[in-house]
Image (cartoon, rainbow, N blue to C red):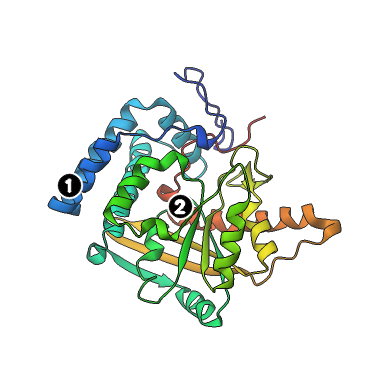
Amino acid sequence: MSAHEVAPPTNAVRPRPASWLDVRERGTLLGIRALALVCRVLGRSVARGVVALVAFHYTLFDVRARRVSRAYLARVHPRVTTRLVFAHVLRFCQVSLDRIFLVMGRTKYFEVTHTGHELLVKQRESGHGAVLLGAHLGSFEAMRIKAEQYRLPINALGFFRNAQMVNSVLEQLDPQTNARVIAIDTGGVDFVLDVKDRVERGELIAILGDRVARGARSVTVDFLGGRARFPTGPFLLAATLRCPIYLVFGLHRAPNHYDLYCEPFTDLLVLPRKAREEALQEAVQRFAVRLEHYVRLAPDNWFNFFDFWETP
């Protein structure tokens, strides 16, 4: 069986979720608060030991997490082992842990390199806003490490209903966290007006473009040797607002390094009326190609623990 013909096991203990939004938030509010207390009192080294135990637990007992991790890793590694699966889950836990320290402002723990950061500074100086398109790759929170220093007003736009416990704890650590968060309401488009106002003020709108919400528009493109659905919403939004799109990624390197990347995607995305779908398909495919490039730079940094690829 080739790396691109990985079949799911037939002994899954629970039905597959219909959407990534159906994947239940893990842990308990008390447990997340306890971890935040460990971070505050004992520091990052002790907290990383705690999340290593958490990663070991999920690798050992979560059948679905192991299955989807193996299905993904088989696309970027010639041979998938349990050690690789554990490293994948562990990296996710470590990056999630670092969100707590970043929200608390404890950036002293981290070393950061920037590639293309000057593009965002120049965009800010222009007085016009832009869309920052990223993915569930590494840490987007790390993109904010230098944001305040360079006066970059970055707003996060997305669906947050399946991360309510984590977000509530982060808000307690820093009440200003939600000031830069715009929640997408699946029942309406009022959030678009908020986004429009912020872009016109010269602010940046950050969107993760590798998950499709139930009922949302999408196209199927080539990605890591398979076919997968990607949302068209971020591209439609940028086209409507007539603002540039930049690709942004923050890759984690153990134990404390983040490589931050920014590259231009388009100054203005034009969707001709008579070739709208073709233009969207082309734009999303270009994004998938660049995402694959960064995924291969740090394969253990991609965190989509659900059935991502289409199967025959």
Q: Residues within 10 Å of mark 1 (few under 14, many from 20)?
A: some
Dot 2 crowding, Cα within 10 Å, few <14, some 14–19, many 20+: many
Looking at the image, residue 206 sits to the left or right of residue 312; the answer is left
Q: Which amino acid lies under the numbered mark 1 shown in the image of this protein?
A: Val
Residue 7's spot in the image, x, y percent? 55, 27
1 and 2 marks in contact (CB < 8 Å): no
On screen, 170 above or below 165?
Answer: below
Q: Residue at x 17, y 47 (%)?
A: 38
Res 187 label = none
What amino acid type should be assigned to the residue bearing mark 2?
Leu
State which mark lies toward you, 1 or 2. Answer: 1
Expressed as whole percent of the image width and height from the top left, the position of residue 86 reads 33, 38
Which of the pair 244/202 is nearer the observer?
A: 202
Q: Is residue 114 above or below residue 205?
A: below
Q: How many marks?
A: 2
Q: Which residue sits at x=62%, y=70%?
A: 244
**Quadrant where the N terminus lies?**
top right
Is residue 242 found left or right of 151 in the rendered image?
right
Q: Residue at x 65, y 38 (%)?
A: 215
Q: Which mark is residue 137?
A: 2
Element type at mark 2: loop
Q: Is residue 192 above or below residue 94?
A: below
x and y, in percent, of residue 264 in the image: 58, 70
Q: Which residue is mark 1?
A: 38
- Residue 286 found in image quarter: bottom right
